[in-house]
Image: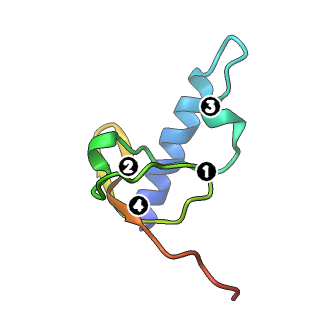
């Protein structure tokens, strides 16, 4: 997890640096984000949207960090 988080931060910093012409990376979020391709969604008919709880596996490759085997998840309760 530590290596993946460091690589994710590097990937996000690189994408933020490339955002030009008034464009913002991922809508301007300051949070670190994972790449998810449509092929990485394992649950049929799952449509991703902001705030939707999901479960996934993390992978690291030459391009950065991403999520795969994405399925819907249960919302976290109060801690």
Q: Circle 2 — which element?
A: strand
Residue 57's image quarter? bottom left
Q: Circle 1 — which element?
A: loop
Q: Residue furthest front?
A: 45
Please report contact status of discs 4 and 3: CB closer than 8 Å, yes or no.
no
Above or below, 54 relative to 62? below
Query: Which one is earlier in the sequence, the residue at label 2 or at label 4?
Result: 4
Residues under labels 1 and 2: Cα distance?
17 Å
Q: Nearer the viewer, mark 4 or mark 3?
A: 3
Please report contact status of discs 1 and 3: CB closer than 8 Å, yes or no.
no
| Residue annotated with mark 1 | 50
Q: Nearer the viewer, mark 1 or mark 2?
A: 1
Query: Which one is earlier in the sequence, the residue at label 1 or at label 3?
Result: 3
Q: 14 or 76, which lies in front?
A: 76
Q: Which mark is residue 66?
A: 2
Residue 23's image quarter? top right
Above or below, 22 relative to 25? above
Query: Which one is earlier in the sequence, the residue at label 4 or at label 3?
Result: 4
Binning the other alpha carbons within 10 Å of mark 1 as few (below 14), some (14 to 19) or many (20 upward) gives: few
| Residue annotated with mark 3 | 25
Residues under labels 3 and 2: Cα distance?
16 Å
Query: Which one is earlier in the sequence, the residue at label 1 or at label 2?
Result: 1
Residue at the spot 58% in from the left edge and 37% down from the top edge: 13
Please report contact status of discs 1 and 4: CB closer than 8 Å, yes or no.
no
Q: Residue furthest top?
A: 21
Residue at the spot 57% in from the left edge and 21% down from the top edge: 18
Query: Which one is earlier in the sequence, the residue at label 1 or at label 4?
Result: 4
| Residue annotated with mark 4 | 3
């Amino acid at each position: 997890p530590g290596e993946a988080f460091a690589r994710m931060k590097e990937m996000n910093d690189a994408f933020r640096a490339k955002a030009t012409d008034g464009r913002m990376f991922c809508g301007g979020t300051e949070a670190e984000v994972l790449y998810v391709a449509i092929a990485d969604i394992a649950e049929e008919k799952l449509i991703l949207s902001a705030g939707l709880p999901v479960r996934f596996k993390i992978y690291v490759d030459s391009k950065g960090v991403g999520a795969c085997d994405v399925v819907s998840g249960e919302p976290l309760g109060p801690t």
